[in-house]
Image (cartoon, grey):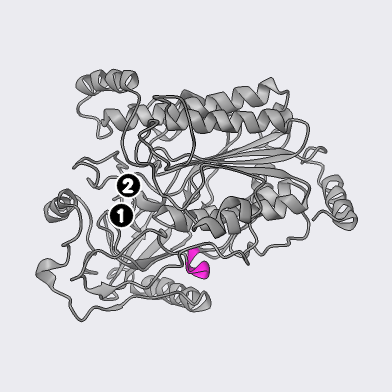
Amino acid sequence: MLTRRRFLENSAALLAAPAVPVRQPNFVFILIDDLGWRDVGFNGSSFYETPNIDALAARGMKFTNAYAAAPVCSATRASIITGKYPARLAITNSPSGKHRLAYSKMLPPESQQYLPLEETTLAEELRAAGYTSAAIGKWHLGGPRYYPEKQGFDVNVGGTYAGSPRSQFFPQWNGEPPIHAAQGAYLADTLTDAAEDFIGKNSKRAFFLYLAHYGVHIPLEGKPGIVGRYERKTDARHSDPQHNAGYAAMVQSIDESVGRLVRRVEGEGLSEHTVFVFTSDNGGLVSAEYKGQAATSNAPLKAGKGFLNEGGIWVPMCIVCPGVTKSGSVCEAPVISTDIYPTVARMAGVRRFIGAPRDGVDLLPALRGGVAPKRDALFWHYPHYSDQGGRPGAAIRMGEWKLIRWYEDDRVELYNLAGDTGELKNLAAAEPARATELQAALEAWLQSTNSIMPVPNPDYDAARETEGLPEAVREQLRKGELPTPAPTH
């Protein structure tokens, strides 16, 4: 509830920060599902066409070292909405994620199946500051008791326990999500219709729009006309590692959605008062878990969704903040999805958080043209076997150094990302002191967050440990197309 005292505090905060527009800014936060770091033009893709996304990024600040807090969707989404690491929330996997590997070396812990109502969400933080908010699209943070409307959002369109639709077309999506549409309607377009409607109805008040697209997650179904165009492009560019025409068509539909939202904001006369945030929940899908085909390529990054390698956690990100951020700005400092909560709240004029986004840092100084707040390190904890072939582990990035600890045998890999973004040269044996320093910092963080941990599996069978994964993924592992923990020397 917005009390008079809280209103005065927020108003005073706005006046004390002249770089923020006097009117409370609106927020359009666009979260894409499984969009890889290199799946947009502004990060180097030449096969996928993202002119609207690229134009949006050019209007604000691009973050060249942006990370998801987890290599899978729900854990990252929880980190965005609470400003806390997945490990602290014990939401380290998807609610629907099941351990399918009866003979794996470790038995993973049970990830929290919902976002507890006791957690303060960004929507609740902004509601106290006078905002109305909508969650449109994927939620995947628990069943009906924990849906967006129970977590501070005034509007919920299509957000349920489900992690993916049955189809990208209506009526084949058949209640997942529970949105009625015209025959043949495309899901990304339908969600964008709802987002535009929300903007139009709330153009006279401060709003927070959380548009979490179900795309570009599987099923890989693009609009036929667009797919055909990329199939022709694939034939001409067969050497490009990004060549999945169906996925490319889905990326284009997402790009068109971004363009529509920008134009709607402009049409409502809100351009100078609306902040856009664009990012993804994890890296692109390179495992062939859908009909034997990989969705994309994150090269030169290693691996993708479900892995703690850079391909699984490095994501595209840009923020447009009119009157605050210069067009064409770039931030090279490492940032992570936990930073979104405190950054948005500060831009909204919140001085004293009602929540506790304790793991995120406010990026507003960087957006104003200064230096991003310094922090000791970034951390990840994924104690699970992913459907994509990833194994349980934890990771830390400190400066340009990154260490991965694999829980199966406590082996570590150490990389200098300044010259090795592909994580090709394991320096753990060559740099034992640094490896020890990072491992100690990682262990201290795991202890401080009471991280849930895997335990040895009494039924472990090395010959059968990948049984339960899609056969195409098992074949990728056998061929070395997907990484397995490497020895330290």
- The residue wearing badge 1 is 423
Residue in view at x 33 percent, y 66 percent: 384
Label 1 element class: loop
Residue in view at x 39 percent, y 71 percent: 110
Eye-nearest disc, 1 or 2: 2
Specify the quadrant that holds the C terminus. Answer: bottom left
Q: Identify which residue, 385 or 377, lies in the foreground.
A: 385
Q: Amino acid at mark 2?
A: Leu
Place of residue 62 in the rendered image (x, y in percent of width and height, measured from the top left): 54, 38
Residue in view at x 16 percent, y 48 percent: 472
Place of residue 274 in the rendered image (x, y in percent of width and height, measured from the top left): 69, 34
Q: Identify which residue, 117 or 7, lies in the foreground.
A: 117
- The residue wearing badge 2 is 301
Using residue 321 as the reference point, say whether residue 469 is left or right of it.
Answer: left
Note whether residue 69 is visible.
no
Residue in view at x 62 percent, y 56 percent: 150
Mark seen at residue 438: none
Note whether residue 192 is visible.
yes
Residue 59 counted in the magenta span:
no
Which stretch did the figure color magenta? 86-90
Place of residue 135 in the rendered image (x, y in percent of width and height, measured from the top left): 58, 44
